[in-house]
Image (spheres, grey):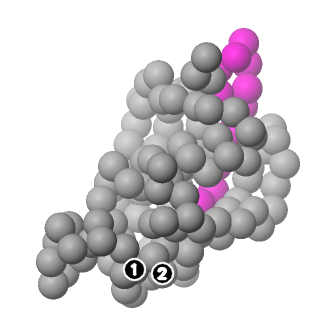
């Protein structure tokens, strides 16, 4: 949905079931930033959640959906023109078709977002 329009990514390191690390480049000129917020754009929280889900789904070649989020924190505002390149770390454990996720989005010196939750494959 947002992949290759709002952002692109590449895997930096890691293998399942340990921690995966991805480098993400945001398109700071994307139209979504015109409404969130004009003159002072920030990356919407819902987009950060969707990016996390899309990257993990794409990497694993499955279509995931979050069935629960037990902890989620937006720690700092992610200003795309200041941080067009960020990293996403995803600690992943798969048990009984449940994908347990512990993830964060961060830049050089700032953590923007943390999430703990569970996902399943869409059928």
Question: In which quadrant is the C terminus drawn?
Answer: top right
Q: Is residue 14 magenta?
A: no
Residue at left offset 39%, top offset 87%: 82
Residue 112: tell me if it is visible: yes
Q: Nearer the viewer, mark 1 or mark 2?
A: 1
Vertically, is 99 above or below 44?
A: above
Using the image, tell me which numbered label, if any, was put on residue 84: 2
Task: Give the spatial CA distance, label 1 vs label 2.
Answer: 7 Å
Specify the quadrant of the image occupied by residue 108: bottom right
Circles 1, 2 touching at the beta carbon (< 8 Å): yes
**Mark 1, secondary structure of its residue:** loop
Residue at left offset 54%, top offset 58%: 3
x, y percentage for residue 48? Answer: 42, 55
x, y percentage for residue 57? Answer: 64, 41
Q: Main secondary structure of the magenta part?
A: strand
Residue at left offset 51%, top offset 61%: 105
Residue at left offset 19%, top offset 81%: 40
Specify the quadrant of the image occupied by residue 44: bottom left
Q: Is residue 94 magenta?
A: yes
Extent of the magenta region: 86-99
x, y percentage for residue 58? Answer: 68, 46
**Dot 1 or dot 2, earlier in sequence:** 1
Which residue appears farthest toward the top when viewing the image? 96
Specify the quadrant of the image occupied by residue 121: top right
Vertically, is 123 above or below 112?
A: above
Using the image, tell me which numbered label, if any, was put on residue 28: 1
Residue 86: tell me if it is visible: no
């Amino acid at each position: 949905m947002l992949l290759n329009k709002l952002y692109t990514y590449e895997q930096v390191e890691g293998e399942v079931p340990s921690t995966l690390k991805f480098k993400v480049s945001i398109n700071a000129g994307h139209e979504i930033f015109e409404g969130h917020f004009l003159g002072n754009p920030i990356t919407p929280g819902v987009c950060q959640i969707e990016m996390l889900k899309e990257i993990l789904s794409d990497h694993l070649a499955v279509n995931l959906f979050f069935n629960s989020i037990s902890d989620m924190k937006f720690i700092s505002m992610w200003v795309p023109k200041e941080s067009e390149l960020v990293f996403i770390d995803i600690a992943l454990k798969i048990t009984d078709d449940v994908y347990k996720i512990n993830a964060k989005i961060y830049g050089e010196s700032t953590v923007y977002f943390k999430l703990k939750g569970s996902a399943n494959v869409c059928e």
